[in-house]
Image (tube, rainbow, N blue to C red):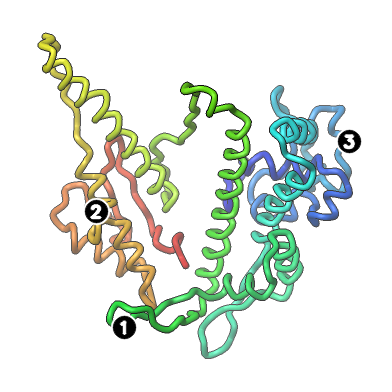
Amino acid sequence: ICVQGKEERNYHIFYRLCAGAPEDIREKLYLSSPDSFRYLNRGCTRYFATKETDKQILQNRKSPEYLKAGSLKDPLLDDHGDFNRMCTAMKKIGLDDAEKLDLFRVVAGVLHLGNIDFEEAGSTSGGCTLKARSQPALECCATLLGLDEEDLRVSLTTRVMLTTAGGAKGTVIKVPLKVEQANNARDALAKTVYSHLFDHVVNRVNQCFPFETSSFFIGVLDIAGFEYFEHNSFEQFCINYCNEKLQQFFNERILKEEQELYQKEGLGVNEVRYVDNQDCIDLIEAKLIGVLDILDEENRLPQPSDQHFTSVVHQKHKDHFRLSVGYLCWLSSLIKQFLKQLVVTLYLMKTFP
């Protein structure tokens, strides 16, 4: 959602909306060309289009990059045409015009959210404030997402702490965020909103299938495999954690339980040896001492930091063979995964606030 490579695009829906939305919808969503939005302009801002659909895309919807280099070509992709086909598909699954517009509002709201910038407040609080030029983006985002403008402003520049006394709820304190923390809060909100939108669309699609009339169904699972990049972050940690759980499920159902069944039935099958990754999963999700619980606890501190978080992890698991301190930077937690070693670099800040 928030960052793409130089030659990469974001999700297709953003470009389809910019390229194909009728003028009345474009005005309601305050849309322009892809280069106008932070979540799009750091990657490729060109549309997929044919010669015919290129003529149907208005000039004010085209980025300078598109005007200079032309459209992207793919026999299966056409942003303008795909927008119309998408609208037809929405109608077929039961979405009326009002619900369809609501979906578009959320998509556009995410784009405008990304255009909100922050600067140091210059006060003794040490927090930050919105840049004056971000006011239009704040207004557009609040309107599209149905939020109070001031509430949105406050939620992006502060985080809420609830003090406790003797295990009871105490006073609510709003802690000012620094610029970097506010940027992370903005991006975290964008990801969360888009994720809920995705879940809603999947739920609406599922409602089209008559599950109640049949005990059989076809389920589709689409998930990224293990990821290991030059620069890894919290996203790679979550993806690889999910894959560790899937690997464990496979180990249990296919390798462990099947072999136990063979032995029970007296089949002369050679034993298949496998690596049990339970210790890796425990390292991540164990109560109180797992990486996730330690991370959650760190975020509750008045002044959380990567250094303190990493120190606590290594302190609690100093003898764990799957965890070691990175050679070049002790802030990097190196978790030895089932297939590859994942270097998780400074992912604490990605979870703020």
How far from the left and from the top, in percent, is residue 38? 66, 56
Observer-side mark, 1 or 3, equals 1
Residue 284 shown left or right of residue 119 in the figure: left
How far from the left and from the top, in percent, is residue 220? 50, 28
Question: Height in image: 318 above or below 302?
Answer: above
Q: Earlier in the sequence, mark 1 or mark 2?
A: 1
Measured in 3D between alpha carbons, the distance from the residue under mark 1 to the one under mark 2, in whole angstroms, is 26 Å
* Displayed quadrant of residue 95: top right
Q: How many residues crowd mark 3 within 10 Å: few (<14), some (14–19), many (20+)?
A: some
Residue identified by numbered label 2:
286
* Element carrying mark 3: helix
Question: Height in image: 219 above or below 118?
Answer: above
**CB-based contact (under 8 Å), mark 1 and mark 2:** no
Q: Earlier in the sequence, mark 2 or mark 3?
A: 3
Residue 162 shown left or right of residue 312 in the figure: right
Question: Height in image: 198 above or below 297?
Answer: above
Residue identified by numbered label 1:
165
Residue identified by numbered label 3:
56
**CB-based contact (under 8 Å), mark 1 and mark 3:** no
Observer-side mark, 2 or 3, equals 2
Q: Which mark is residue 152?
A: none
* Element carrying mark 1: strand
Q: What's the residue at 88%, 43% (across, down)?
A: 58
Q: What's the residue at 47%, 67% (across, down)?
A: 353
Give 328 or 80, whichever is nearer the viewer: 80
Q: What's the residue at 53%, 75% (across, down)?
A: 158
Observer-side mark, 1 or 2, equals 1
* Element carrying mark 2: loop
Q: Amino acid at mark 3?
A: Gln
